[in-house]
Amino acid sequence: MTEYARRAGSRPEQAGSSRRRLGPARLLRGLAGVDETVLRRVWHERARHTALGGTILGTALIAAFSMWFAVNQVIGRQSPWSLVPAAVWFLFILNFDRQIVTSMAGNMQRAGAMLARLALSLMIGFVVAEPLIMRIFETAIEEHIKEQRSTQLDTLRTSLLSCNGEKAATAEDTSTIEECRGYLLSFAQTPGSIRRELTGTRAEAKEFQGVVDRESGQLRTLRDAAAKECAGGRGTGFTGRPGDGPRCRQRTADADEYARTHPIEENTRKLADLRGRIVDLEEQLAGAVTTFEKTRDDQIAERVEQERRHQGPIGFLERLDALHDLSTSSAALFVSTWAVRLFFVAVDCLPMMAKFLSGASGYDRLYRVRSESRERIFTEEAATEERRFVDQYSAEREEIDNQARMRRAEHELTLQEHQVLLRSRRDRAVNDLADKLLREPRRQPTDPTDPASPATRRPAPDRNGQPERDVNAHVAF
């Protein structure tokens, strides 16, 4: 590593800065991702970056309160456990805004990146703003929800009353039952059977009353006519002679025959019995109706109370619906909610906008110079390190090649020494054999013409079919 790289890589400012006490202002600048060693060069911008860190902290706190309100609205009550998601949301928004602000340091000319950051800030701003809006208009929202719930319970009670009358309960009105599907209650006993029996008894009594009145009137007419004839009454169909004459007896016999052939007295007794039965049924019906209405009212009350329990605490979605209903029904509330919503969205976007609107500062320029310098130093360090390792590996590879060549040379030398040794041993063996042959006595020369003579005898072939060499010739050679 070069001397410049060592000087640039070392940061003597950190030693002095680490010994400085961490105050609130420096902590706020830390939230904004400010490098104190660079900021020390432009010390006059400390207040600016301290304010930026305070803006980030304030945005994260507002987001934490929003999450706390949202969790409490979801569970329907305030709970200390809601602080856990609020703290997580606080850290998330804090790091998100810090990342956006630090990514803009020294790099504020890219429009695409700025639009992407703005879009993310807007989306998170709307998420943060909604619980706060519902908290601000909480009174109106809860009153609206309570009215809606009360209306729902009243509608349920009315539907149960109208759909569980005597006709609906006894399935006498099928059209009503079809319209009241889901609102019908079950009863062990209804007054419908008593009412039907009472209706039938009244109809029967009315029929008997007509028969008795008609027959009684006819019998009374016949008897009046017989009495008038016997008394000598005058008129159409009367003789005008008093006494028990044939016409008198005939009319009296007709009246008696009519009374004998028509059970007027029996019908009168039946009519009296029916009227007594009607009175009993009316009393039974009154008691059955009272019992039915009490049972029905108890079931309706239980059903309404069950529905009230199912409503439970006011939830988050219910608040959203109520806020939407109130906004659509009131123009003033609509404008107010959107004004508050846009305000909180602007607050959430404030760190990025503050960084963007303030423009490139001296710190941003120095930060960019420092970062580019660090990149160049790292590039040179990487290249130097790469060259060092490449040279090291090249030297190791050459050493391995040299060792391989040395091993091959040693092997060739060993092979040559072995060959020389073999030749030396062969020469000694030949010399020893030649000396042995020379020490043997010579034979007398014989006749050349003698076939048995050594001079004329040809050497015998060896195992390969070649003539045996002359040892003396070899030795002479």
Image: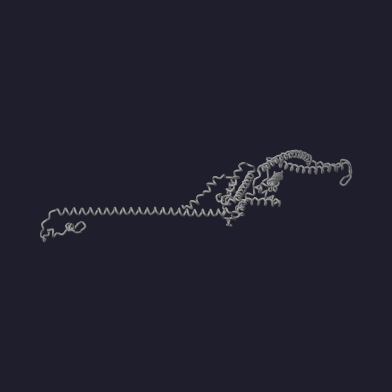
Question: Relative to 421, is 87 on the left or the right?
Answer: right
Question: Relative to 131, is 420 on the left or the right?
Answer: left
The answer to whether residue 474 is seen in the rendering is: yes
| Residue shown at 49% from the left, 51% from the top | 7
Task: Give residue 430's position: percent from left, percent from top.
Answer: 20, 54
Question: Relative to 454, is 186 on the left or the right?
Answer: right
Compare residues 343 and 178 and report the one nearer the observer.
343
Task: Give residue 137's position: percent from left, percent from top.
Answer: 68, 47
Compare residues 150 and 223 and report the one nearer the observer.
150
The number of numbered badges drawn on the structure is 0
Question: Relative to 450, is 384 on the left or the right?
Answer: right
Compare residues 125 and 211 and report the one nearer the observer.
125
Task: Give residue 410's position: percent from left, percent from top.
Answer: 31, 53
Q: What residue occupies the far bottom of the structure in this picture?
A: 449
Task: Give residue 179's position: percent from left, percent from top.
Answer: 69, 48
Q: Is residue 464 positioned above or below 281 on the image?
A: below
Q: How is the image coloured?
A: one colour
Placement of the C terminus among the 4 image quadrants: bottom left
| Residue shown at 40% from the left, 54% from the top | 394
Asked where in the image residue 110 lies, by quadrant, the reply is bottom right
Compare residues 261 and 414 and report the one nearer the observer.
414
The answer to whether residue 156 is seen in the rendering is: no
